[in-house]
Amino acid sequence: MTQDELKDVKLPEGMNPETLSHLMEPRNYGKLEEANGVGVALDEKTKEYVIFYTLFDGNMIKKAMYATNGCQDTVVIGSMFTDMISNNDLNYANDAIRRMNEKLGTMSDQQQVCADLVFRSYKASMQNFENVKNGADEELHLYKMEDSCEGANNEQLI
Amino acid sequence: MNNLFKKKHELWLHINFASFAISDEEIKARLYDFSQIAFRHMKWIAKDVLENNENYNYDRDIMLYKSTSVFEIIKKLQEVTLETMKLYPDDVLGNRVKTDDEYLLEYLNQIIKNSENDKEITSFNMKREWLDKNLAQEQIDALTLFLFEESYKEYELILVYAYMQARTKDLTQFDVFQDLIDESHFHLKSFGNMMAKMGILALPRELHELTYVIKDLEQFVKDGIAEEEAAKEMCKELSDAIKDEELSKFFDFINYQESYHIELMQKLLK
């Protein structure tokens, strides 16, 4: 996906064939053994988490993968986001988050919480990469979420 | 990590999802029985692994074999079964598992001998139709989402409870875990068959060890009770949303089963 295409970033609005495809076969799902940044975002109230694996190479994200015990909104956003940022640079990833957040701003609170779990886990993987680079002995970096999926507006993204 | 366990886990899923995909009721039922046997093999292999002071996990390398032909699915199942059988050890358990799988292969051969069995498979066509029901699009969407959420959840529960059951020495806990595993098998079967009927059959996502390596049983049970409450609510919402008496009654039935799961889980807190 190019910067221009990011302007029209797609989100799983409604049960369209693309969303269904991400649901049936989430992209980049599972562990990335060669990751050099591993981050977790945890909703402490519901215990839902996203673990994000990133392989950084200089300013580039060579590969991104994720896993979650969360809801299908989280699965679909994780699938789309990892697809978008793999083989792109860090600026592109930040722009992708901004664009997705802009779109999500028009949707429900629960969708925003699901997206935040994905984005925060990616940020945690960056933090883990930095910490290890600076000599820390850290297997993964954990962010605990302030907002919980529980109690958020229950209308779902898909 | 133990490769035999991993391959047996994959074979269980292959047989289980082949049974969901195939609509012929007799073949479906027989394959489901074989999948339950394969799950028991997993349980025994897990016990063996732990007794040898080794460990296993729920990592897997499996793609659901999607085809429009029963025979193609059966042939793939034969291939995967033969590959897995190469790993069985030459001991009492290994020989039991091997003879079970030899009989599975014999049954798969019997299916292929009769060309009338090679019917079309529609379980992966993504059409999202329920041909004998008149469901509005929003009801189909709600049902689709529910089936994806809950089929993953049931798969997760089967594996998490099995993981804990293999590690407990407490008889009450063992019994409760077995009941919950049995119930979740039934739910996974029900939801898997519904997904196949709608053309959206898909494997549940792989479990990450953060999900199944439980360090605090009490907290896990409390969280699990909250999840069962949420599942009950989803069933109730779906039952209300679906304007079909037969389906609504089915979701009410599942809802009551979830209520009893909470009672079972409360026993783990005593």
Image: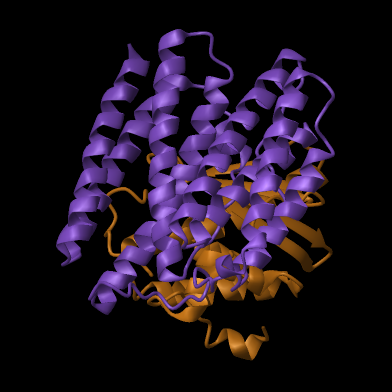
Chain colours: A orange, B purple
Q: Position of residue B253 (x, y in %)?
A: 22, 44
Which residue is depicted at the point 31% across and 23% down? Answer: B264
> Does A18 appear above or below A22?
below
Q: Is residue B181 left or right of residue B222?
A: right
Residue A89: quarter of image: bottom right
| Front one among B119 and A82 | B119
Report how many numbered discs are placed on residues in the image.
0
Residue B243's image quarter?
A: bottom left
**In which quadrant will I find the N terminus of chain B?**
top right
Q: Is residue B254 visible?
A: yes
Identify the residue at the far front of this view. B114
Q: Nearer the viewer, residue B249 or A126?
A: B249
Return the residue found at the far top: B170
**Residue in the picture at 53% in, 61% down:** B202
Please identify the quadrant where the C terminus of chain B is shown: top left
Q: Is residue B69 left or right of residue B233?
A: right
Q: Position of residue A99 (x, y in %)?
A: 52, 77
Viewer can see residue B204: no
Side of B110 where A47 appears, left or right: left
Q: Residue A81 in the image: state x and y as whole percent.
A: 59, 68
Q: Is residue A108 left or right of residue B69?
A: left
Residue at 80% across, 32% down: B88
Instruction: Residue A101: give x, y in percent of width and height.
Output: 46, 71
Residue toward you, B8 or B98: B98
Q: Is residue B78 above or below residue B208?
A: below
